[in-house]
Image: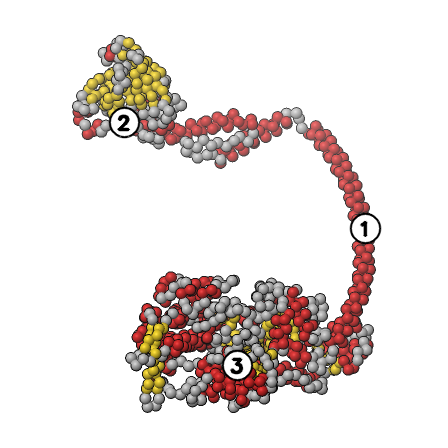
């Protein structure tokens, strides 16, 4: 029990002292300012709206409250929901949770929290989770179509809702049924400045995509609709776009098809567009005022959207057909009447759409008929309303609250009486205000206000709100709870606040003045038959189903029941439903009018506590005995106050309680002993018990601390003593171990010396000096044999490119290991050569010769290595003229390619074909394939070539030769490596001498009995592409640039 321990204020107002209105308000304010918004009155929960999100909800708190009973933790809505659910599941008692309070007090949020808690603690499973999700998702749908922003509340429920959630025997939800009461449909066409119409209109315009708006023939701007206040289109903290998406998602989860969702939105669009239908004055031929449509575009768009003839809709709006059993009379409506008809149609369409949505949700969440079920009802209904101008809606709302207050008082007293009777405690009659006289004033079948309102609506002749008020004044002139201007004048009372068209009822929550204007119209709630028939003729399936009375086959001249009769019947059914269940109450309070967190208006809260009857509720709860508890729990808490029950009590719980109270000398008038519970009359006695318990706990705590400190010191001493003994024993053992180790090492050393001396002595006796050489030779040979055998098993592959070789295990094997590596590599090369064909051998010899001549000298050599030597680069086989040039006895042509001959006089180049045979080099013209020059290979004195990547080379000739007298040749070849390599081998074969090949960037040429210096330089590009540029520098120098 935590109600009196470390709490802020008093958590249960039953224990409040003194019990007065001021102390009750101060207690609520104190708790509210400290963030404690929940307070108990027995099993009733009082909730003060914090206007902010508090960190006291979620899975962690749900798990916390589901494991404790009602009073074990701080007051919370989860505790009340847990009691209701456990009573339903474990005790098989149907439950109902009644959430009351005025607009803005947090009723809707409270109902959501109750449903969330029940959904979290009940069973799991695919079907169960689906049902829970559908029940929870019904809230966004009903809020969108039934809630609106008012002056007092940004999300005010403008309808009453009672939801029966049905469970199986295990406590898992099966489904539910929703009943709605008195939707404020007048808000569709009219609402106060600063308020909004129902949320769905703004959500549709803000959240629909452009295609949907175009299909519904709507514009996104809310200022373009007469039924929407332009100044209050947005609400702080409310995202209409996101809410519209949530609405569509919720409807899908509940089971609405895409077509149904579209039809619902089309009907909503129809209501919006009806408000923009403007009516103009017209006159009939006889001068009688009539009306017509000012602009037919709006009517035409409505007709196109719902499949309705616009002319027929216009006729239904501007005229009325009066039908009797014998004849029909068509009457034209003036502008005021036509506007009334238009607004009545909009209100009826929206109201019937809302009822259809509720029925459609019920179809999705309904339970099969064959299952046995338990029921938990949640009632979220409008609270008591006292406005500046109270009309028919406030009248029926306050009538409903009078009935709920009557139920609350009767059930509370009944529960008290039954508990006293069950426990054998004498019942003391409680004086309280019985509001049955007020309920009777309103609902009496013959002489009640609702009955007279119906009678006035049905009476033939001139009927008006004034005649209705006059009748009330006549019938209730002497009623104690009815006032009007007429009754006040008769009693010579003056009240300037009472209007001539008003009457006042003294409700249990205070006096409320009602204005009778529009009572008759709102009670009649008439919709002309022409409009019903026009809606039924629409091709829109949903709209057509909303007006079944428009079907000519079902036409009836019987007058439909009035709004008052329907609401009275709904309230009677609701009361019957509540009486059949165990009630749980949540009283919601609004702390201020500005919806500001942290602000607490004592005057406003005092008004609400008065009409919620909180003080009266506390008095009823405290009637006779303010506090009661089971003997076992009471003894467990207070047994420490008696020496005979502390520490151990072996007797019964009741005897133990009597022993405790007797030892404390509690007056017998303050307590009563029931069969299972102890009853305490005054909170002072309970506070006295708590004070004694607190003092005793302090004494016991001191004793426990003293005992603990002594025990701790003894334990510490024993631990220190054991530690000291352990350390001493370990130290002595360690010292002995070290001493033994030294003695053992010394003995081993002495033994080693003795064994060595004996071994040396025996060696000298049995062996000669040559034994050492024999042993060393044997060891060496063994190591060598091991090395060679290991090398045999670890030989590398026979690939000539594989130069791997295992290292020698000892340094004195390095020389032998190196020689073996050379032999093995030579053997691999020989084996590789033996496998080659003669042609492959020749190719490799040419590549070897090229390597010897140019490797590391010529920059273009590495690129030529992987490229095979082809020899024929001019297509010699297809050119007979070139074949004739070489002669028959010359043998095959070694190289045939196109070269560039550099003119030694001006540096210009010309193309030539060069043929290299075994004996000659032939240079011919590329055009006519005629030999220009034939040079014998024995006339070639040498070759000069650069180190760059170019193909320039100089062919030096002997002066004594016939060709050599003309000078040396300067040529450029694309295959200079191949050409010079084959020329070198041809000269060697023909003359048995090596052709000198000089790699240099500066060399001289013989030209016209003189010499020409050639200088080869590298261009700025680095000579990467090998292109040449020749330029004459004077008469004796030629500069060649390699690009």
Give yes or no for contact between labels 3 and 1 (Cβ–Cβ under 8 Å).
no
Compared to 748, does 478 lie above or below? below
Q: Earlier in the sequence, mark 3 or mark 1?
A: 3
- SS of the residue under disc 3: loop
| Residue 164 visible, this angle | no
* Residue at position x 32%, y 86% in the image: 328
Question: What residue is disc 2 on?
Answer: 871
- Residue 584 in picture, x, y percent from top left: 60, 77
Of the residues tagged 2 and 3, which is closer to the observer? 3
- 941 sits left or right of 824 in the view: left
Q: Residues within 10 Å of mark 1 (few under 14, many from 20)?
A: few
* Residue at position x 19%, y 20% in the image: 931
**Res. 86 mark:** none
What colouring method underlies this structural image?
A: secondary structure
- Residue 642 in picture, x, y percent from top left: 80, 74
- SS of the residue under disc 1: helix
Compared to 677, does 139 lie above or below? above
Q: Quadrant of the N terminus?
A: bottom right
Question: What residue is disc 3 on?
Answer: 500
Question: What residue is disc 1 on?
Answer: 724
Q: Residues within 10 Å of mark 2 (few under 14, many from 20)?
A: some
Picture quarter containing residue 1004? top left
């Amino acid at each position: 029990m935590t109600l009196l321990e470390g709490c802020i204020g008093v958590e249960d107002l039953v224990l409040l002292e003194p019990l007065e209105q001021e102390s009750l308000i101060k207690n609520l304010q104190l708790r509210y300012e400290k963030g404690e918004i929940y307070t108990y009155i027995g099993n009733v929960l009082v909730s003060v709206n914090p206007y902010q999100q508090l960190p006291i909800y979620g899975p962690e708190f749900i798990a916390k409250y589901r494991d404790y009973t009602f009073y074990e933790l701080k007051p919370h809505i989860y505790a009340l929901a847990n009691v209701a659910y456990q009573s339903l599941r474990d005790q098989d008692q149907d439950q109902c949770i009644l959430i009351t309070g005025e607009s803005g007090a947090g009723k809707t949020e409270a109902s959501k929290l109750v449903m969330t808690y029940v959904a979290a603690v009940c069973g799991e499973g695919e079907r169960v989770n689906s049902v829970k999700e559908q029940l929870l998702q019904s809230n966004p749908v009903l809020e969108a179509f039934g809630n609106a922003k008012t002056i007092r509340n940004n999300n005010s429920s403008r309808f009453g809702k009672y939801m029966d959630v049905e469970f199986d025997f295990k406590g898992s939800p099966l489904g539910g049924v929703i009943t709605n009461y008195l939707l404020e449909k007048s808000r569709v066409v009219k609402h106060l400045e600063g308020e909004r119409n129902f949320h769905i209109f703004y959500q549709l315009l803000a959240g629909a995509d452009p295609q949907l708006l175009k299909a519904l023939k709507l514009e996104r701007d809310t200022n373009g609709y007469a039924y929407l206040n332009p100044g209050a289109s947005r609400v702080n903290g409310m995202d209409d776009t996101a809410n519209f998406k949530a609405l569509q998602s919720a409807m899908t989860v509940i089971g609405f098809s895409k077509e149904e969702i579209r039809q619902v939105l089309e009907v909503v669009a129809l209501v919006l567009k009806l408000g923009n239908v403007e009516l103009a004055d017209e006159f009939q031929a006889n001068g009688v005022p009539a009306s017509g449509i000012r602009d037919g575009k709006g009517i035409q768009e409505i007709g196109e959207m719902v499949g309705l003839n616009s002319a027929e809709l216009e006729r239904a709006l501007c005229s009325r057909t009066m039908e009797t059993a014998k004849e029909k009379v068509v009457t034209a409506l003036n502008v005021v009447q036509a506007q009334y008809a238009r607004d009545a149609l909009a209100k009826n369409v929206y109201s019937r759409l809302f009822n259809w949505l509720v029925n459609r949700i019920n179809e999705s969440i309904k339970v099969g008929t064959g299952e046995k079920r338990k029921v938990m009802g949640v009632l979220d209904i409008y609270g008591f309303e006292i406005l500046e101008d109270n009309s028919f809606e406030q009248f029926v709302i306050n009538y409903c609250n009078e009935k709920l207050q009557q139920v609350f008082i009767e059930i509370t007293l009944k529960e008290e009486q039954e508990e006293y009777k069950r426990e054998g405690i004498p019942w003391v009659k409680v004086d309280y205000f019985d509001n049955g006289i007020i309920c009777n004033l309103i609902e009496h079948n013959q002489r009640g206000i609702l009955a007279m309102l119906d009678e006035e609506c049905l009476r033939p002749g001139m009927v008006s709100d004034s005649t209705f008020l006059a009748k009330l004044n006549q019938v209730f002139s002497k009623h104690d709870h009815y006032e009007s201007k007429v009754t006040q004048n008769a009693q010579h009372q003056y009240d300037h606040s009472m209007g001539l068209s008003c009457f006042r009822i003294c409700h249990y929550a205070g006096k409320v003045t009602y204005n009778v204007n529009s009572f008759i119209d709102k009670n009649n709630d008439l919709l002309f038959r022409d409009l019903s028939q026009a809606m039924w003729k629409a091709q829109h399936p949903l709209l057509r189903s909303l007006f079944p009375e428009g079907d000519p086959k079902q036409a009836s001249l019987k007058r439909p029941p009035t709004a008052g009769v329907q609401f009275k019947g709904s309230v009677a059914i609701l009361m019957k439903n509540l009486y059949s269940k165990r009630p749980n109450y949540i009283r919601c309070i609004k702390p201020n009018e500005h919806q500001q967190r942290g602000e607490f208006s004592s005057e406003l809260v005092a008004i609400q506590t008065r009409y919620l009857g909180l003080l009266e509720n506390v008095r009823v709860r405290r009637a006779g005995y303010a506090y009661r508890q089971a003997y076992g729990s009471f003894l467990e808490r207070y047994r420490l106050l008696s020496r005979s029950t502390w520490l151990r009590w072996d007797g019964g719980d009741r005897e133990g309680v009597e022993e405790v109270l007797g030892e404390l000398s509690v007056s017998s008038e303050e307590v009563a002993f029931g069969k299972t519970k102890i009853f305490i009359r005054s909170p002072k006695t309970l506070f006295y018990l708590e004070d004694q318990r607190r003092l005793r706990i302090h004494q016991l705590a001191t004793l426990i601390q003293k005992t603990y400190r002594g025990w701790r010191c003894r334990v510490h001493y024993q631990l220190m003593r054991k530690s000291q003994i352990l350390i001493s024993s370990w130290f002595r053992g360690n010292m002995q171990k070290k001493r033994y180790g030294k003695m053992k090492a010394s003995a081993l050393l002495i033994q080693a010396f003795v064994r060595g001396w004996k071994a040396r002595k025996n060696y000298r006796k049995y062996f000669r000096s040559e034994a050492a050489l024999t042993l060393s030779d044997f060891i060496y040979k063994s190591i060598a044999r091991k090395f060679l055998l290991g090398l045999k098993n670890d030989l590398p592959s026979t690939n000539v490119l594989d130069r791997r070789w295992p290292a020698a295990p000892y340094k004195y094997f390095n020389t032998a290991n190196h020689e073996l590596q050379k032999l093995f590599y030579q053997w691999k090369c020989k084996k590789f050569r033996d496998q080659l064909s003669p042609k492959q051998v020749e190719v490799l010899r040419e590549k070897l010769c090229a390597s010897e001549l140019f490797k590391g000298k010529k920059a273009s050599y590495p690129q030529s290595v992987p490229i095979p030597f082809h020899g024929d680069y001019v297509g010699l086989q297809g050119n007979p003229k070139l074949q004739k040039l070489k002669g028959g006895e010359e043998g095959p042509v070694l190289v045939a390619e196109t070269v560039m001959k550099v003119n030694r006089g001006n540096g210009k180049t010309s193309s030539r074909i060069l043929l290299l045979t075994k004996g000659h080099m032939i240079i011919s013209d590329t055009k006519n394939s005629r030999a220009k020059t034939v040079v014998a290979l024995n006339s070639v004195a040498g070759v000069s070539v650069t180190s760059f990547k170019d193909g320039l080379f100089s062919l030096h000739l002997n002066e004594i030769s016939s060709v050599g007298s003309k000078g040396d040749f300067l040529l450029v070849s694309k295959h200079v490596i191949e050409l010079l390599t084959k020329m070198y081998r041809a000269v060697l074969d023909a003359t048995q001498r090596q052709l000198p090949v000089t790699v240099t960037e500066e060399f001289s040429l013989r030209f016209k009995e003189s010499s020409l210096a050639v200088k080869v330089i590298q261009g700025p590009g680095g000579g990467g592409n090998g292109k040449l540029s020749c330029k004459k520098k004077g008469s004796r120098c030629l500069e060649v640039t390699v690009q």
